[in-house]
Image: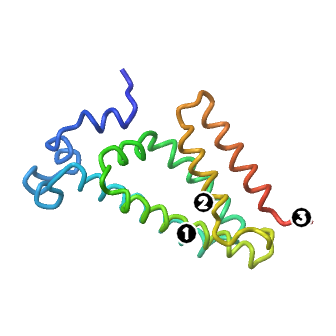
Amino acid sequence: MDREPSAELFDLRFDDFARLAGVGTGTLYRHFPTREALAEAVYHGEVAALCDRARRLQATLPAAEALATFLRGMVDHIDAHKGLARTLATLMPDRSGALAEGSRTLEQAVTDLVAAAVRDGTVRDDVDAGAGAVMMALHGISAAHDRPGWRAEADDVITLVLDGLRRPL
């Protein structure tokens, strides 16, 4: 029976995490004394990987293409990690600061992509440089991942966001 990844994560014992990581339980406990500490490390690793991807795209693609590729990739990421954010939030209830810090870091990566597209003239110059609306769309997509037809709707939302950002001809 297929289960949501978050359910699988809740069912895992610390020994299972060690096995999945290819290390001994003692090694895992030395680095992550609690499941919460492990969840926080996973979260920070995910944010760092996404921010690195944003920087690589910005360095290698035209600005509008980098932004579109990143946002569509975020939908892929959310799809591949369904339930992870909820699981991490549940495992990290006293670490809301860590979640907020990661969110700010990711928002800065999106802001940089939007700002580059504004500078090259492909995105409207009246777009909020803070990329708050773009982040809100991503949060909404993530929060709605249990909806039937989620993937198609998520792709449609990204298309709407990109169309709304585009500078009129």
Would you place residue 151 above or below residue 50 in this image? above
Would you place residue 10 above or below residue 21 in this image? above
Q: Secondary structure at mark 1?
A: helix
Would you place residue 3 above or below residue 67 in this image? above
Measured in 3D between alpha carbons, the distance from the residue under mark 3 to the one under mark 2, in whole angstroms, is 22 Å
Q: Residue at x 74, y 79 (%)?
A: 119
Instruction: Residue 29: name its quadrant.
Output: bottom left
Compared across the picture, whether 41 is left or right of 69 comes to: left
Q: Residue at x 61, y 70 (%)?
A: 111
- Residue extending farthest top: 1
Residue 118 point in image, percent of width and height: 75, 74
Residue 127 point in image, percent of width and height: 75, 68
Which one is nearer the viewer's eye here, 167 or 2? Answer: 167
Mark 1 vs 3, N-terminal side: 1
Mark 1 vs 2, N-terminal side: 2
Q: Which residue is mark 2?
A: 70
Q: Which residue is mark 1?
A: 109
Q: Are marks 1 and 2 in contact (CB under 8 Å)?
A: yes
Label 1 crowd (10 A; few <14 / some 14-19 / many >=20)? many
Which one is nearer the viewer's eye here, 2 or 84? Answer: 84
